[in-house]
Amino acid sequence: MKKKIAIIVTAPIAVKIHLFDLVESLKEDYSVFIMTNLSKVNDEFLNYLPRDLTLIDTKMEREINLFKDLRSLFILILNLKKNNIELSFSLTPKAGLLASLASFVSFIPVRIHVFTGQVWLTKSGLRRFILKGLDRLIYSLSTKVLIDSTSQRDFLLENNIVKEKKSLVLGSGSFCGVDTLRFIPSDEHRISMRKKYNLSPDQIVYLFVGRLKKDKGVFELIESFSHLRSVHKNINLWLLGPDEENIKNQILSDKMSKEGIEFIPFSPNPELFMNAADIFCLPSYREGFGTVIIESASCGIPAIGTRIYGLKDAIEDGITGLLVGVKEIESLKHAMERLLQDHVMRKKMGETARMRAKEEFDQRKVIKRILEFLDSEYKKVAD
């Protein structure tokens, strides 16, 4: 008989982007139940999810709504009991809270949550206090929590969110790793993508990949780039990702220079853009780990990020990229110019980043560590 595991996430896109390969590997020894919000998902999207598993609609939503959250909690409890689930595995804050509550009251023997960053980090006052308390509750109701970077675990320990006993980081961090056979340097892709965007071989491309939001440091990145562009006409900035906060129109209304900036709403193949780029930029205010950093590293390009927990693990400062202060436009601009001007440094950092991605964050190694961890936790209760 296969063990039964419930993967609980707020939105199914997390399964497609972050958990697809893990779920595929789990299916060998587990009956997998995906519990997520399916109410707004079409059949075409469902075809992109792993096969041979059970999908359960929790109607869970990201925004706080007491009535809807209680409804989702009831659905989770009902289905955890009905399907005799033995392990629950959750990530993202809302899913973590509801999953830990539902799993605890349903007497699920193995309850695992993955911390991938704290939403309260950029909050203040009562809201921060409440959100921190909810993270403590998630920890207390879980049998173990995984944390996707060492520096994030240190931060959570310092803030008394988790304790040493039930929290750990697997390997060097990351819970999904990077497919180093997909994210790989390619001259062919570099040439074709640059041709598509009318860029000559000598032009330098800075790349951002992620949701376009203020707390991703997008405004600081654009301002720093605009200053550099006034001096260096051979540079370009690509912003790849959904514009969740109407960033593009805010920039247009501010009458900031848009010269050299390309907004790209979405691509299922970010590796194509990483191959065409020269320097990856993520001046975020908060990150759990920064998967896009190791994806770009696997493509052989160095990164510039902020000196925050998570990114400090994804980027080795001065070795695979450069770290700067949060919201420090001058230091960000200096780092961008430094890599622009020093071709030898840029090339060496990119090569080292690729090597580190393969050795420490290869997806197959990361998934193997997670499977071994889950099997170990299950055996403890089974014995």
Image (cartoon, grey):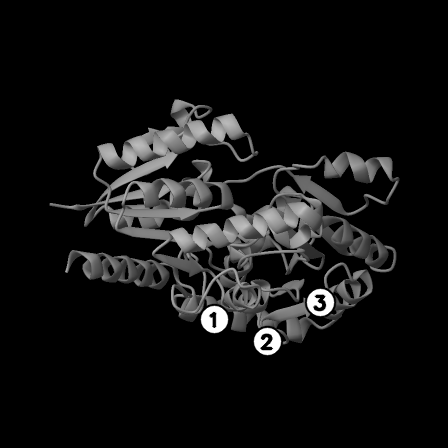
**The C terminus is located in which quarter?**
bottom left
Mark 3 sits on what residue? 324
Give the number of the mark in front: 1 or 3.
3
x 85%, y 35%: residue: 253
Query: Dividing the picture into quarters, in which one does residue 340 lie?
Result: bottom right
Position above or below: 87 against 328: above
Which of the marked residues, 1 or 3, is nearer the chain's N terminus?
Answer: 3
Query: Dividing the picture into quarters, in which one does residue 282 lie?
Result: bottom right
Count of labels in the image: 3
Which of the marked residues, 3 or 2, is nearer the chain's N terminus?
Answer: 2
Can residue 238 be seen from the camera position used here? Answer: no
Q: Is residue 218 left or right of residue 276?
A: right
Q: Which mark is residue 154?
A: none
Mark 2 sits on what residue? 319
Mark 1 sits on what residue? 356
Position above or below: 263 against 322: above
Distance of label 1 from label 3 (alpha carbons)? 21 Å
Distance of label 2 from label 1 (alpha carbons)? 10 Å
Assess disc 3: are there few (<14), some (14-19) or many (≥20) residues with their C-alpha within 10 Å of its C-alpha: many
